[in-house]
């Protein structure tokens, strides 16, 4: 990586040539046993350090010793002063940053910080964070700190992890936005940190243990892993915290919104790393503009609806470059070719380029940096056409048409291909499926599913394609099946708990979530998820409203994640006795 400043290339070249030829030099810098002939005015231009160095020297002084850095680093600094360029590599970046910081050469400091920010990974983020203890760079320090928080479970396994101080580790463990798949990872991280220097660090167990939110684990984990640990057993403060957690753990099953506050940190749920959004759909006798956000950490849905945005159903959604795109659909009056873009950081809607075709019942997928819209219904015909959107040009272009006309289908992306399955061709529910390859701009048929499915849900999960629900022409299905692209075969998996079609579907926290839908008589707010490890479906918290034709997407790593989940100070614990079953709204399907 190189840095170039705004000084004239011609004058830099001339001055550097004079330096290399030893002409008109008026000072010598000495680092260890190496000397550098320079022009004072050139080095003054790149750093106030040199202005101070030469402001009041003895009149006859020509040689200036600079301690604390190597001759190689001094060579880089001098070349930067004369040329405006500096070469930064993985091998020299930390030493160069320290040298530039010592000499207050801010152009080199910034270049090194930019380079380190781009190199962040679980193995080096703590080292980079610690570098900012010496070299003041608030931007790099914050970036490295957030990287540690966002990738904590991988960082814990790095060789650098024990280098954190007890206060730094305590502060990290205290954060609501600490990204851990389960709270037990926090306890195990503490044990790993202490184990690095057990005799010195075991004194910190109570301070660190107080940051573990034990209520977010389970009775079994506390009994088998926490209470049996020698550090916990031998510390009265830790035992008291365990006792408090056990009192809460017995009746707890979920959280709920509350006017009361969770003042104790023990049950306070952390912010999720990813959320599921349910957008639009058909509710009762009308389309809706409702957007609900699902927080897996609390099993709660929260309304994030923008009331100025119009309703939309039978549409598709796609997440790309920090925005959600709502594509096509229907509002009871118009079949849309329009596309709306939602900026998740500012929570504002913007108009994007319209598609070439109106598409209700459309299938949408993201592949690479493009959004694909396939099939649908234009108000007159079921479509086989497909098109591709490139956000950098804000334009849609047609791609090869599918083999089958498909509305009410569903699609997903796997192994650089787009799979689309099922749907309705105007006469029949479809059993067929095909995939698109962007390299060849061709569609290829694959094996048929085990049954016809229109209003189907399709998602890529664990290197397979899962198909759930849908309508076979006579029955709304609860069945689910999985496609193996290596063998080109489908096989049945456990059926859903509820028969449904026109549901939303997404993968969140390594589970398939199915949201809403209808069974021909009732609209659902019901939500359930599938875990492939045990081939089992489990009920999750219902949405606030019943709806079918809903489209879902997952957002991860949001800087404003707290805006999409319930405030942690507004939650209370629900015991088994407080749980009630949500009722479903019945209505004729449009």
Image (cartoon, helix red, strand yellow):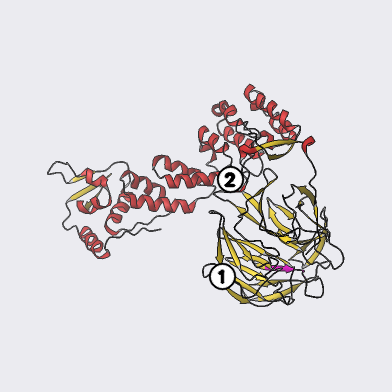
User: Can you identify the residue that label 2 sits on?
Assistant: 562
Magenta span covers which residues?
418-423
Q: Is residue 195 left or right of residue 403?
A: left
1 or 2: tag closer to the N-terminus: 1
Main SS of the magenta part reads: strand
Q: Is residue 361 above or below residue 301?
A: below
The CA span between labels 1 and 2 is: 31 Å
Tell me the element at label 2: helix
Who's the residue at 63% across and 69% down the image? 372
Who's the residue at 71% across and 73% down the image? 377
Numbered mark located on residue 429 in the image: none
Quarter of the image holding residue 306?
A: bottom right
Quadrant of the drawing holding the C terminus: bottom right
Quadrant of the drawing holding the N terminus: bottom left
Q: Position of residue 439 (x, y in %)?
A: 61, 73
View extreme (right): residue: 474
Q: Report crowding for label 1: few under 14, some 14 to 19, many 20 or more residues within 10 A (C-alpha).
A: some
Q: Position of residue 334 (x, y in %)?
A: 67, 70
Q: Report crowding for label 2: few under 14, some 14 to 19, many 20 or more residues within 10 A (C-alpha).
A: some
For the residue pair 335 and 456, the one nearer the viewer reads as 335
Q: Is residue 463 visible?
A: no
Q: Position of residue 361 (x, y in %)?
A: 72, 68
Q: Is residue 219 visible?
A: yes
View extreme (top): residue: 236
Q: Is residue 60 left or right of residue 136?
A: left
Numbered mark located on residue 353 in the image: 1
For the residue pair 199 and 239, the one nearer the viewer reads as 239
For the residue pair 270 and 69, the one nearer the viewer reads as 270
Who's the residue at 55% across and 29% down the image? 201
């Amino acid at each position: 990586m190189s840095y170039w400043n705004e000084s004239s290339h011609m004058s830099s070249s001339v001055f550097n040539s004079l330096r290399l030829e030893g002409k008109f030099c008026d000072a010598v810098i000495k680092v260890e046993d190496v000397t550098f002939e320079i022009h004072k005015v050139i080095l003054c231009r790149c750093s106030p350090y040199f202005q101070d160095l030469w402001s009041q020297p003895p009149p006859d002084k020509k040689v200036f010793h600079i301690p604390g850095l190597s001759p190689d680093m001094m060579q880089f600094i001098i070349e930067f002063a004369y040329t405006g360029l500096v070469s930064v590599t993985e091998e020299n970046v930390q030493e160069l940053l320290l040298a530039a910081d010592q000499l207050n050469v801010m152009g080199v400091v910034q270049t090194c910080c930019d380079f380190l920010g781009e190199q962040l990974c679980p193995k080096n983020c703590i080292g980079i964070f610690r570098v900012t203890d010496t070299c003041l760079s608030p931007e790099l320090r914050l970036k490295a700190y957030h990287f540690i928080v966002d990738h904590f479970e991988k960082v814990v396994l790095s060789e650098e992890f024990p280098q954190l101080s007890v206060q730094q580790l305590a502060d990290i463990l205290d954060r609501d936005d600490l990204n851990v798949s389960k709270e037990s990872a926090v306890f195990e991280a503490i044990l790993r940190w202490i184990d690095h220097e057990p005799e010195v660090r075991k004194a910190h167990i109570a301070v660190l243990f107080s940051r573990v939110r034990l209520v977010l684990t389970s009775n079994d984990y506390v009994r088998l892993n926490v209470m049996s640990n020698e550090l916990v057993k031998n510390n009265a403060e830790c035992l008291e915290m365990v006792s408090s957690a056990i009192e809460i753990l017995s009746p707890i099953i979920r959280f709920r919104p509350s006017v009361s506050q969770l003042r104790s940190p023990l049950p306070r749920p952390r912010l999720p790393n990813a959320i599921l959004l349910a957008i639009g759909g058909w509710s009762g006798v009308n389309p809706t503009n409702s957007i609900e956000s699902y927080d897996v950490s609390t099993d709660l849905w929260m309304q994030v609806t923008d009331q100025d945005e119009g309703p939309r159903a039978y549409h598709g959604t796609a997440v790309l470059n920090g925005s959600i795109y709502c594509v096509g659909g229907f509002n009871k009056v118009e079949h849309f070719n329009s596309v709306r873009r939602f900026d998740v950081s500012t929570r504002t809607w913007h108009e994007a380029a319209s598609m070439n075709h109106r598409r209700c019942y459309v299938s949408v997928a993201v592949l690479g940096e493009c959004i694909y819209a396939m099939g649908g219904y234009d108000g007159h015909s079921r479509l086989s056409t497909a098109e591709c959107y490139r956000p950098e040009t804000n334009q849609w272009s047609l791609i090869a048409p599918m083999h089958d006309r498909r509305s009410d289908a569903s699609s997903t992306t796997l192994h650089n291909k787009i799979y689309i399955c099922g749907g309705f061709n105007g006469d029949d529910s479809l059993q067929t499926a095909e995939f698109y390859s962007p390299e060849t701009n061709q569609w290829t048929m694959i094996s048929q599913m085990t049954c016809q499915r229109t209003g189907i849900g399709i998602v890529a999960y664990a290197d397979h394609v899962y198909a759930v629900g849908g309508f076979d022409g006579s029955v709304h299905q609860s069945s689910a099946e999985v496609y193996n692209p290596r063998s080109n075969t489908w096989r049945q998996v456990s059926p859903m708990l509820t028969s449904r079609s026109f549901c939303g579907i997404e993968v969140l926290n390594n589970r398939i979530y199915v949201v809403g839908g209808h069974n021909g008589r009732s609209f659902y707010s019901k939500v359930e998820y599938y875990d492939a490890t045990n081939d089992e479906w489990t009920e999750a918290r219902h949405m606030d409203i019943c709806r079918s034709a809903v489209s879902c997407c997952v957002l991860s790593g949001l800087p404003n994640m707290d805006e999409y989940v319930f405030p942690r100070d507004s939650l209370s614990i629900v015991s088994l006795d407080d749980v009630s079953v949500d009722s479903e709204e019945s209505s004729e399907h449009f």
